[in-house]
Structure formats: C-alpha cells, structure tokens
C-alpha cells in the first residue's frame, strides 16, 4: 500500500507497510501513482513485465520522456527489491501472537484527586468529579496501587505512574508520600518508577516546583494558549480566567527544567479553529515543548469539533508545519507533540499493532482504588475491572482490550496512518460507537493530516538544497 | 537515485523479530490523554 501526497512543495511517497518515506520529483510522483493504480500489489517481477512499462508510457508519455520513465521504473524496482516500496502487510499473520501475548501492567494513571479548582468547560472528568463524587485518594489506596503495579509488572523494569486528576496538587501531600514509597519499593524490587504530574498550575509554588524537578520524569502543564482562548474554556469556578495566575508559574517551571521533560498542553475547540496561533503563542511565551490537541466533545456540545471544521483545521496544521520548518532553520525551533515522528527509531511493529495499551498495560485507579482500562473510562461502570485490594476481577474486559488492534477495525485496514496511531483511541471509539473496535472518523482525519505534516517537516529539514 | 530520495534507513519489517520487549512508554502517559499517538514514541531498545 502506497500513500502519496504533496505538501509545502514536497512530493512525498509513503510505503505504508515498511514505513519507508521517499521524497520524489514530479515525474517519479506520477510514475509511482500510475503503478499503484495498475497494481497495488506490484512485485519486482510484475514491475519488470513488459506490459508495466508499456502501460506507463501510454499514460505518461505526453508529459515525460521515455528515458525518464524507464529510469524511474528502474529506481522503483530497486526499492521494491529492498522492501521499501510496494511492500505487503505481512504483520497480520502476527496478530494472533499479539492478541494472545501475556501482558504485564506497566503504567498506572492515579486519580489522586477527583476534585478541581478550575471549571474547564470541556472537561471529560466533569470538573474533576468523573460522573461521581468528589474524593481524594488516600495514601493507603495509593500504596496499594503501587504494590499492585509492582506485583503485575513481570520483568518490566521501567514503571510509569501519572499523578492525574481532577487536579493532583489538591492532594499534594499524598503525591509526595507516594513518590517516597515508590522510591523505597523500587530498590527492593529492582524497578524504576517514572513519575509524571499533570497539573493546571493553580497551586504551583516554589516548593512544589523543586519537588517536581527532583522526582518527576515528565510534567504536563495544562493551558490552552492565548489569554482569551484559555480564559473562555478554563475559568475558575467563579468564572474568572486562569491565564494571568498560571502563565508565569509555568514559564518559571519550564525554565527551571531547562525546557526539557515537560509539555505545555492545551486543548483546541471549534471556538479557536485558528489554534496554530495558540501554539505560536506558547512559543512566544518561551515554551519549547508544546502540545495542543482537539477537544473530544458530544455532538451537542457547541465547542465540539465537527466534520465541517476539518478543512479549516487542516489549513492550520499546514500553516503550523510550514512555520515550524522556518523556525527550525532559523534556530528558533520548538517541539509540537503531534508532529513528532521518529522515522528511524520509532516503535516496533509489535507496539504499533497493539496500540496504546489501555486495559492491559495501562490502567487508571480511582481515589477509592477501583481499576478502569484508562482515565477516560473512569466512572463508566461497565468498564470497572477490579480494585487495588482484589486486583482484576473482570479479566474479560482486559481480554477485549487485548484483542483490539488495527486489524480488528475495518476502517484501519484501508488507512495509511494505521501504524502511527495504532488504531486510535478506544475511549473515543466507545464514546461515539459504543464499541472499542471502531474508529472516530473526525479524529482519524486529523491524525492523518498530522502524520502528513510530520513527515513533510522531516522531508523539508532533510532538504539541504533549500 | 536521481528521482527518488529515501529519508529513512530503518523499515518496520526489521522490527518484527527484535521488537516487543515492552519497555517503551505507554502512549497516554506522555502528553495526549485524549488521542492515540503511538507512532511518535521512541523505542527504548535503540537508545
């Protein structure tokens, strides 16, 4: 399967099943397109067949010389022999192995506080309460969660724990105590905890900053961008905006971490479809690790992204990608999470087939110790898997998540981006289709665009002639 | 290669046999929490 597209003046050919990325001239772009239309399953043998060259000549002779067409065909044959063009999807044969694999739990999302000091209008946790009651996780429950993680992590050494909410700084002492407990336990069990904190910053102070910098591998700082954008969607409970209080704290924290191992993370909605300006606003504020992603709302929510918004969103991603290329060349680059792509050292096929790991490798723990497949399922009783006292009591839920892959979703089979999103978010699928084995098409469209932009950026930065 | 420039040397096929160690980061632990972004992660084995 081949996906080809043109972006920012680059002709890009992605060989989907090998992940090989080719930047080509217009003639090669057209030749490869014609070959794909001829036979999507071309092999070196079929490419060498006389009728293949004949077909190309009859289709393209009016635009390109016979010599050019033949030269390009030779290059295509060489790349196909190397397994970089017209490769077939050989991974589906491995899927049973992936489905039946014995998984270990390697990450927990600890809902340290089901309470929040902001009242963000789009919050999937309903102002931190997750369709339930306000609650703070006790040290005892947190300890049992870490014990559960260690006990179910097999030989995996690196264990991830995200302190999440609501707002985790509203239960800060428990966070500190759990980090201390984790550090003690990792020595005993030869594990290494990677702690992450996701915070809105309201309660951030020097003491917390010092602790975060010492103990947290990553910190996710929630802010939506420009003041008017942020304050519209992220007000305090009294309606007052949060931007002025939070921005200086986040700037200070980011600098104190040498602009590393953090993300300033925002959400865009249909209220700010010009969200590239929010990304650039973050850059202007001095942030270098930036993430802004689309809101996921109900169709009835006025701020939810609709399919008719997609053209505008695509233009924004294109604009942002071009600006990022320019800034990188000027030595003023920044990281945008959704354009990060590692063409050389990315995840293995096994990871790409198995997806995000929710329900199997990754679980969410509520303040009272219930286990759910991920933070987005918390509060949906049909997904309650167990608790930190008894462990997993409904393994069939884990089995269902384990069986979910790009091959269990019909839409993924024909999608060029399937090995980059790994089938997409199961919570989004469930939200819109009441099954985890489907896709949320609006989200898929945006993901495809982001993959295209990310690859274009790589192509542009590799282009030394410019 | 006159008309085609290939950007990457690694291919996914090469990771079939060596992959699957499971030491990599869980995707939602990074910065997303509402989408799925596996492809931008880094393999812990190649660090």
Image (cartoon, coloured by chain):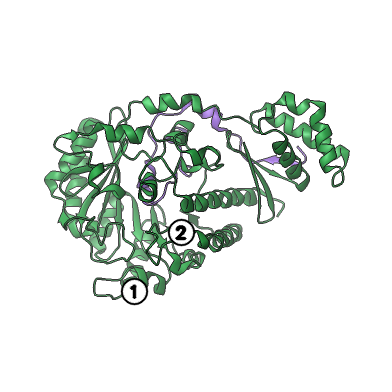
- Residue picked out by circle 2: A288
Residue B47 in sight here: no
Q: Nearer the viewer, residue A328 or B18?
A: B18
Q: Nearer the viewer, residue A276 or A61?
A: A61
- Residue picked out by circle 1: A244
Say if A439 sits above or below A237 in the image: above
Q: Residues within 10 Å of mark 1 (few under 14, many from 20)?
A: few
Chain A shade: green
Q: Secondary structure at mark 1?
A: helix
Q: Residue at x 19, y 43 (%)?
A: A370
Q: Secondary structure at mark 2?
A: loop
Mark 1 touching mark 2, by CB under 8 A? no
Q: Could you tell whether A167 is left or right of A227 in the image?
A: left
Say if A409 sits above or below A165 in the image: above
Residue A436 in sight here: yes
Q: Quadrant of the C terminus of chain A?
A: bottom right
Q: Nearer the viewer, residue A209 or A230?
A: A230
Q: Position of residue A207 (x, y in %)?
A: 23, 60
Q: Residue at x 21, y 58 (%)?
A: A129
Q: Position of residue A385 (x, y in %)?
A: 23, 38
Chain B shade: purple
Q: Position of residue A417 (x, y in %)?
A: 53, 43
Q: Position of residue A250 (x, y in %)?
A: 35, 64
Q: Residue at x 75, y 46 (%)?
A: A25
């Amino acid at each position: 399967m081949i996906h080809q597209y043109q972006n920012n003046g680059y002709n890009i050919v992605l060989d989907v099943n090998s992940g090989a990325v080719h930047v080509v001239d217009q003639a090669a772009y057209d030749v490869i397109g014609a070959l794909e239309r001829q036979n999507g399953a071309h092999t070196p043998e079929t490419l060498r067949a006389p009728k293949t060259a004949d077909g190309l000549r009859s289709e393209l002779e009016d635009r390109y010389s016979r010599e050019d067409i033949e030269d390009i065909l030779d290059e295509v044959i060489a790349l196909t022999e190397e397994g970089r063009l017209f490769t077939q999807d050989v991974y589906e044969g491995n899927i049973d192995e992936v489905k039946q694999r014995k998984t270990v739990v390697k990450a927990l999302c600890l809902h340290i506080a089901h309470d929040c000091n902001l009242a963000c209008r789009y919050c999937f946790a309903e102002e931190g309460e997750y369709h339930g009651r306000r609650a703070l996780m006790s040290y005892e429950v947190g300890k049992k969660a870490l014990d559960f993680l260690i006990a179910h992590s097999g030989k995996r050494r690196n264990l991830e724990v995200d302190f999440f909410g609501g707002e985790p700084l509203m239960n800060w002492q428990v966070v500190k105590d759990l980090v201390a407990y984790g550090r003690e336990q990792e020595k005993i069990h030869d594990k290494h905890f990677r702690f992450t904190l996701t915070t809105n910053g309201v309660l951030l102070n020097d003491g917390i900053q010092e602790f975060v910098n010492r103990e947290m591998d990553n910190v996710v700082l929630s802010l939506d961008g420009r003041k008017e954008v942020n304050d519209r969607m992220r007000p305090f409970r009294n309606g007052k905006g949060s931007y002025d209080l939070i921005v200086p704290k986040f700037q200070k924290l980011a600098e104190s971490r040498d602009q590393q191992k953090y993300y300033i993370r925002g959400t865009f909605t249909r209220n700010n479809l010009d969200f590239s300006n929010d990304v650039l606003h973050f850059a202007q504020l001095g942030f270098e690790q930036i993430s802004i992603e689309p809101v996921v709302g109900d169709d009835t929510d006025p701020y939810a992204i609709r399919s008719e918004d997609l053209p505008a969103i695509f233009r924004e991603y294109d604009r942002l990608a071009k600006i990022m290329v320019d800034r990188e060349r000027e030595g003023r680059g920044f990281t945008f999470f959704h354009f990060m792509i590692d063409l050389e050292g990315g995840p293995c096929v096994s990871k790409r087939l198995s997806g995000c790991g929710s329900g199997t490798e990754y679980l969410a723990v509520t303040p009272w110790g219930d286990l759910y497949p991920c933070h987005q399922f918390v509060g949906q009783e049909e997904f309650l898997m167990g608790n930190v006292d008894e462990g997993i009591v409904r393994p069939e839920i884990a089995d269902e998540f384990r069986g979910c892959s790009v091959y269990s979703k019909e839409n993924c089979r024909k999608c060029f981006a399937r090995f980059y999103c790994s089938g997409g978010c199961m919570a989004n699928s469930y939200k819109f289709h009441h099954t985890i084995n489907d896709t949320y098409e609006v989200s898929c469209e945006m993901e495809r665009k982001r993959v295209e932009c990310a690859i274009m950026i790589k192509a542009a930065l590799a282009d030394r002639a410019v | 290669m006159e008309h085609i420039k290939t950007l990457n040397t690694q291919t996914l096929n090469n990771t079939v046999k060596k992959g699957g160690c499971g030491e990599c980061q869980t995707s939602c632990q990074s910065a997303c929490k509402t989408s799925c972004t596996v492809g931008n992660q880094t393999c812990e084995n190649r660090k």
